[in-house]
Image (cartoon, helix red, strand yellow):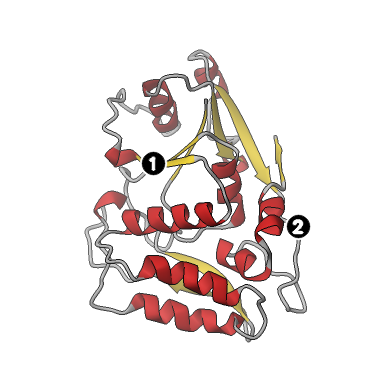
Amino acid sequence: MKIAIMQPYFLPYAGYFSLIRNTDMFILLDDVQFIRHGWIERNRIINYNKYWQYINVSLKKHSQKTKIKNIQINNSINWSRKILAQLESYKKKAPYYNTIIDLLNSVFTNNFENITNLNYSLLQKICNYLDISSKITVFSQMNLDIEDVLAPDEWALNICKSISGVKEYWNPEGGITFFDKEKYKRNGIDVKFLKYNLTPYNQKTKTFESGLSIIDLLMFNSINDVNTLIDGYTIV
């Protein structure tokens, strides 16, 4: 079995979905400290006046050491309405605008108290839309009994060891200098590093803006084309 483990990002970039699609189980690691101004509560979309802009979910105040699983959404602010208003910039340019807005609304109309559950639901909805059948699960809800983590790269190792049948662990290429592959190999696990290579598509802009939320990709491409694009990776 092949697994990947990532923090629960909000509407992440296409390479995140490449990891999901090409593994059997994708685990959202939410039992670690939340880092402000990362990708848990925000992402980037096109802004036709200044290249790109952030869309973000409003969060309640929390202490610095709060874990992701305990980060609460501030529903006193209508953050989803603001996001949908920002996405209107796509309305006259993107052929799949209405379809993707309906997809987002099908999630946003539910009441979410914490960011992990919101992000899980969005990931699952998009994967269903793209017919990606990999299992997505939330670490804090798995009740796994893992060994003590003594080094940063042992989160993934110890989770893999606690799940029967794991033979491969997949990670974005940024982890090449971070993971001790020999440590994994001694435990019968092969580490693969995925390098995502996004082929530019027509964003109706003068220059292509890379690294945006999956939403941008979905706005401009058919389901078949999106799947082709998210499969643009190599193993390094």
Question: Is 153 rendered above or below residue 6?
Answer: above
Residue 67 visible: no
To which quarter of the image does residue 61 belong? bottom left
In which quarter of the view is residue 122 placed?
bottom left
Could you say where residue 216 lies in the image, as x and y percent from the top left?
61, 68
Task: Kindly indicate the quadrant of the structure image that contains residue 52.
Answer: bottom right
What is the x, y in percent for residue 129? 54, 57
Instruction: Tell me the element at label 2.
Output: loop
Q: Residue shown at 39%/63% (left/top)?
A: 41
Tell me the SS state at disc 1: strand
Quick one: label 2 or label 1, which is nearer the N terminus? 1
Image location (x, y in percent) of residue 79: 35, 76
Mark on residue 71?
none
Give the residue displayed 56% in from the left and 46% down from the top.
132
Question: Is 224 in front, or is 45?
Answer: 224
Which amino acid does the dot numbered 2 rest on?
Thr
**Which residue sits at x=72%, y=48%?**
232
130 relative position to 139: left or right = right
Which residue is label 1 attached to? 137
Q: Is residue 10 above or below residue 22?
A: below
The reply to whether residue 30 is in sight is yes
Q: Nearer the viewer, residue 153 or 91?
A: 91
Q: Are marks 2 and 1 in contact (CB under 8 Å)?
A: no
Q: Nearer the viewer, residue 32 or 160?
A: 160
Whether residue 187 sits left or right of residue 96 in the image: it is: left
**Apparent side of residue 142 relative to residue 84 in the rendered image (left or right):** left
Q: Name the residue: 77% across, 79% down.
A: 206
CA–CA distance in space, label 2 to label 1: 29 Å
The residue pinned by badge 2 equals 199
